[in-house]
Image: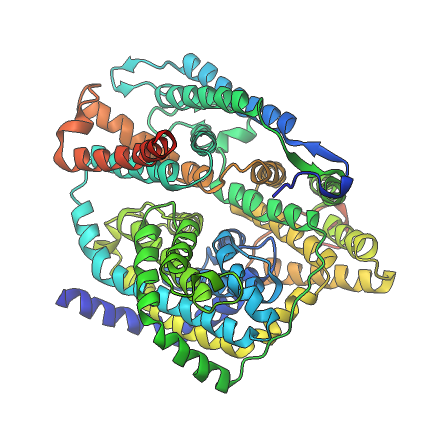
């Protein structure tokens, strides 16, 4: 877990992250309450209305979130060091691009590109190794899922071109 | 009792069929690999592989998946001892003395101890399950909605009261889970809830997708943050090592037995394996004459947490089987599997699906014996997996998580959901929000709500229904005690 900024590294402190996250959980609670009120939180002829339970749960969540924010105001310490967050971003950014590409290109091509990128850039290997690992893994996934288990995975224009 | 014994024998006949043995082996090997790899724990690994079992016979499927669980439990010990990386939260206490032992050149002894401890703990818990689960199930058959709600309330109260950490954060995580579970079609009125006009949200949040994001992807983020310079010893276990260690282990039988009891008791409550391992370690340290050598490579510091953690991890399946209420995230994923194979979880399983239940219980005995021999024999190969550079592993895990999330319901939107939960899970772990209550609330949310609403329907809205029925009142009383007693005690200590 986060240490208190050893070694003079720049770091993101914990308080703002706690407060923002508490705000988000509170927002979820608030949304649940609003929709529960729309559905009705009272009693119908066939028992409690659909909003009854979400209203209780949402209210507890909102209350607890406010309490968490109040506690967080006095919080000290570090969330994470900047270089650590950079490492996480080096994974999170390609992951987001990868997920964003799947609806357009299917799952196989983006997976291969992602693996090539990781092995080449993060791992520092040559092109040949990267290509071999990427194509080998994707081919294995294709055989296991599409042929052995007959589970159809998302496909894009390139797979269509190849006749799948 | 005699009827149960013959059911168990019949279960062995099912579990020992050659194709089920093959699935068992496959599950164990996959499980150890999953347990060794960062980012692929038991719950997440099983969630990813679950869709592959749709076309399998339920009993073969559960045997394979539960063996993945045993394998993952064994695998966690390998990384804890050799690399000081706890594969699962309940392996943390194992690193305290396991890693120092490995650095002193006693890696083989530490590993053998951990595996044996795991085995003994699991075996103890399986015997408990065999003896207790049928009676609990037959009692639960008489449960109505109020009793069911009380059991679930107790399960969630145990998280808050016994989970450690901030109770407010535990409650927040749990309530998020309940809100997520409510999204989509309301099962009673058929109304759409919390979808805010989105068609993608009508399906609701599948907890498998949540598990893959929260336990899989977020773990990869955490691992990469730490930079991942794996430093660790190599290990080979010879037959001589095993004999020598087993003799030492046998001399600590009382410690092992106590750890089994602690683990089994705590495993049945959803607070589960992690506090069990710490508690067992703490008690062992306090009661040992050589308590001051704990943390410096004392073998007792390996026996206590490993035995308790595995007893707890195994006994977590007891409420899952007997009541349909999982005791851990992994048990929750297995429960999700039951529903996907078309089985109704809960006490009726013991009546309607005898082959399934007893086949599973028998496979636990066989699986743990086979698992013990596999890990003892194959440690060097499994440890070698961690020498594969993390850049490759991280990419592969990401691809597997995406495929796993998609195959749950053949929905591309779920891949996005999985990514969001991966990032949320990373932030939650950094901020010390517990993840298990969230997952269990997503799993049990609909059934908790149904039990609650049906109870109120029975009583025409009168909350006293939870206090006037004897079993319900008893369970609720225990739940409130669990919820508030730890706080009261802590408050007293502070003011005294």
Q: Which residue is at a point 24% across and 72% down the rendered structure image?
A: B9
Residue A46 x, y percent position in the rendering: 25, 19
Question: Between B125 and B214, which is closer to the camera in this rendering?
Answer: B125
Answer with left or right where residue B6 lies relative to residue B254. left
Q: Is residue B57 visible?
A: no
**Residue A121 relative to residue B346: left or right:** right
Instruction: Please state, as top left, top right, bottom left or bottom right, where the N terminus of chain B lies in the image.
Output: bottom left
Taking the view exactly as shown, the residue that stands out farthest to the bottom is: B240
**Label total for image:** 0
Is B430 located above or below residue A107 in the figure? above
Of B202 and B382, nearer the camera is B382
Task: Identify the residue at horizontal 56%, vertical 73% (top origin).
Answer: B107
Query: What x and y, as percent, mark residue B457?
Result: 22, 23
Residue B259 occupies quadrant: bottom left
Q: Residue drawn 72% across and 54% down?
A: A163
Residue B337 percent across, percent down from the top left: 42, 51
Percent across and percent down for residue B183 are 46, 28
Q: Is residue B31 above or below residue A10?
A: below
A17 vs B67, left or right, is right
Q: Nearer the viewer, residue A137 or A71?
A: A71
Give the colour scheme shown: rainbow
**In this rendering, position of residue A45 left or right of residue B220:** left
Quadrant housing residue B7: bottom left
Against B419, residue B17 (above or below) is below
Looking at the figure, which quarter contains the C terminus of chain B?
A: top left
Q: Kindly tell me whether residue A150 is visible in this rendering.
A: yes
Please tell me in which quadrant of the rendered image residue B168 appears. top left
């Amino acid at each position: 877990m986060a240490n208190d900024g050893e070694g003079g590294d720049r770091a993101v402190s914990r308080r703002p992250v706690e407060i923002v996250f508490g705000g988000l959980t509170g927002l979820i609670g608030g949304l649940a309450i609003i929709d529960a009120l729309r559905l009705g939180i009272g009693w119908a002829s066939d028992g409690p209305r659909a909003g009854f339970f979400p209203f209780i749960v949402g209210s507890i969540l909102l209350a607890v979130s406010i309490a968490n924010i109040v506690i967080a105001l006095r919080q000290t310490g570090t969330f994470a060091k900047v270089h650590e967050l950079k490492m996480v971003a080096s994974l999170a950014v390609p992951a987001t691009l990868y997920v964003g590409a799947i609806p357009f290109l299917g799952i196989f091509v983006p997976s291969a590109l992602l693996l090539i990128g990781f092995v080449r850039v993060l791992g520092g290997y040559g092109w040949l190794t990267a290509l071999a690992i990427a194509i080998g893994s994707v081919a294995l996934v294709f055989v296991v899922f599409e042929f052995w288990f007959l589970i159809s995975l998302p496909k894009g224009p390139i797979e269509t071109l190849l006749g799948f | 009792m005699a009827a149960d014994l013959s059911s168990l024998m019949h279960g062995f006949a099912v579990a020992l069929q050659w194709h089920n043995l093959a699935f068992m082996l496959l599950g164990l090997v996959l499980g150890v690999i999953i347990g060794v790899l960062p980012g692929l724990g038991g719950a997440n690994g099983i969630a990813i592989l679950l869709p592959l079992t749709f076309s399998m016979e339920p009993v073969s499927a559960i045997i394979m998946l539960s063996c993945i669980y045993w394998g993952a439990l064994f695998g966690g010990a390998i990384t804890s001892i050799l690399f000081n990386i706890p594969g699962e939260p309940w392996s943390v206490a194992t690193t305290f003395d396991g890693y120092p032992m490995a650095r002193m050149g006693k890696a083989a002894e530490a590993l053998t101890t951990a595996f044996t401890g795991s085995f003994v703990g699991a075996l103890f818990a399986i015997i408990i399950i065999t003896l207790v689960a049928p009676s609990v199930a037959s009692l639960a058959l008489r449960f109505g909605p109020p009793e069911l709600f009380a059991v679930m309330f107790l399960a969630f109260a145990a998280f808050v009261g016994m989970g450690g950490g901030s109770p407010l954060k535990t409650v927040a995580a749990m309530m998020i889970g309940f809100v997520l579970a409510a999204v989509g079609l309301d099962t009673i009125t058929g109304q759409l809830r919390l979808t805010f006009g989105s068609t993608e949200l009508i399906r609701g949040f599948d907890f498998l997708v949540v598990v893959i994001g929260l336990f899989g992807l977020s773990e990869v983020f955490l691992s990469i943050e730490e930079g991942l310079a794996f430093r660790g010893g190599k290990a080979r276990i010879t037959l001589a090592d095993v004999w020598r260690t087993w003799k030492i282990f046998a001399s600590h039988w009382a410690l092992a037995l106590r750890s089994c009891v602690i683990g089994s008791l705590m495993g049945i409550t959803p607070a589960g394996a992690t506090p069990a391992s710490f508690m067992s370690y703490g008690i062992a340290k306090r009661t040992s004459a050589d308590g001051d050598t704990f943390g410096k490579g004392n073998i007792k510091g390996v026996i206590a947490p490993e035995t308790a953690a595995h007893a707890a991890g195994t006994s977590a399946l007891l409420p899952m089987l007997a009541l349909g209420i999982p005791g851990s995230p992994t048990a929750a994923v297995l429960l999700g599997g039951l529903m996907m194979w078309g089985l109704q979880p809960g006490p009726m399983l013991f009546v309607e699906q005898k082959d399934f239940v007893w086949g599973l219980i028998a496979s636990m005995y066989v699986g743990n014996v086979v698992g013990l021999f596999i890990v003892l024999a194959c440690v060097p190969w499994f440890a070698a997996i961690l020498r594969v550079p993390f850049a490759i592993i991280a990419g592969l895990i990401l691809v597997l998580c995406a495929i796993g999330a998609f195959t749950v319901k053949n929905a591309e939107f779920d891949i996005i959901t999985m990514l969001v939960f991966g990032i949320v899970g990373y932030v939650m772990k950094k901020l010390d929000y517990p993840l298990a209550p969230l997952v269990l609330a997503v799993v049990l949310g609909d059934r908790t709500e149904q039990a609650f609403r049906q109870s109120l329907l029975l009583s025409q809205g009168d909350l006293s229904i939870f206090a006037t029925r004897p079993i319900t009142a008893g369970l609720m009383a225990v739940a409130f005690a669990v919820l508030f007693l730890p706080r009261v005690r802590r408050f007293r200590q502070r003011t005294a």
